[in-house]
Image (cartoon, rainbow, N blue to C red):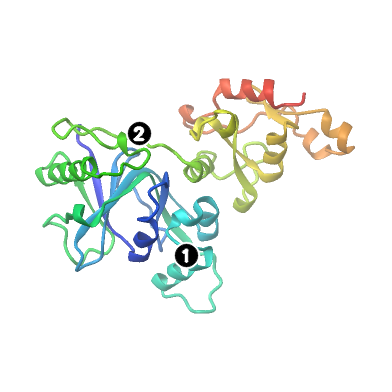
Amino acid sequence: MAVRLILAVTDGDWFDQLRLRPELSEVNFWSPSDSPFRALQPGELFLFKLHSPNNFIVGGGVFAHANSMPCSLAWEAFKDSNGARSQSEMRARIAKYRKAKPDDREDFVIGCRILTQPFFFERERWIPAPKSFALNTVTFKGYTTADSEGLTLWESVQDALTSNPVMPAGISDVVQSRYGEPVLVRPRLGQGAFRVLVTDNYMRRCAVTGERTLPALDAAHIKPFSEGGSHEASNGILMRRDIHSLFDSGYVTVSPDMKFEVSKKIREEFENGRHYYALHGTDIVLPKDIQRRPDRSALIWHNENAFKG
């Protein structure tokens, strides 16, 4: 099968911050504008190129998801995996690219390209950019392994990865046979990617209340990661933050038939909860994609191990 690759011009500060972090499982390759990104499907490669005159490919990652979100929420989801030391530093960099006024306090909406299994090459393994990559390109250029140039690029990346003396976690999934047919790589979602993907799966609405105020919403793990739960979309439900807190504490749950249930313990312990009891027995709103709906076995686990009944 043909696999697409994107070669994107990389912010130098972003690269310098992240190349020293081989332990990272995910990064946010953000764009100062919120233009949609549809150039890749999950599992294809997103490669980084330095600004001219350093026309080299210096790393990449496995594309997992793309969306637009306020920069404050991008920071909350990914922290320094945004390639900045602080939220204010990230915002200042965005403002510079957008040529914003110094007193502009807008929470800029940015484009986010979420990459898992990131890798950064040592200087001696940098790959020269293909001749077709114009020096005046300011965003990215697409390639495909169906073409000789794209296939050569894919093989060069594979060679650079296999010759790397230090193999970061997750990169073994990216490495494929030098002479085999290229195939998609399964993205290993991290906490940030999980949060963003679940948020978008539920159309940015609380599955229980329909609340749409984005800063008030959380991606709740059904089975906690600490208990062996995964960061997969099917292990997540988008909830208003107070409901998420009650869910994690076992005061509410979602039954295997997708109904919201409230424990009698709220009334017994807090002499309160009228608002939550009004929601008891209601159907939660489900993602359109059946594969991303709550996993029934995870719901059973929560009902049997977390819910106070």
Disc on res. 258 = none
Question: Badge 2 local density, few (<14 within 10 Å), some, or many (20+)?
Answer: some
Q: Does 198 sit above or below residue 129?
A: above
How far across and down, in percent of the image, does residue 309 sit? 77, 23
What residue is pinned by disc 2?
186
Nearest the camera: 47 or 40?
A: 47
Left/right placement of residue 34 relative to residue 203 reads left
Q: Quadrant of the N terminus?
A: top left
Give the mark, 2 or 1, whose residue is nearer the N terminus.
1
Q: Quadrant of residue 155?
A: top left
How far across and down, in percent of the image, does residue 222 sit? 60, 31
Q: Residue at x 76, y 26 (%)?
A: 308
Q: Residue at x 22, y 40 (%)?
A: 162
What residue is pinned by disc 1?
90
- Residues at marks 2 and 1, CA–CA distance in whole angstroms: 29 Å
Looking at the picture, which amino acid does disc 2 mark? Arg
Question: Badge 1 local density, few (<14 within 10 Å), some, or many (20+)?
Answer: many
Left/right placement of residue 292 relative to residue 283 reads left
Q: Residue at x 46, y 27 (%)?
A: 291
How far across and down, in percent of the image, does residue 114 sit? 41, 48
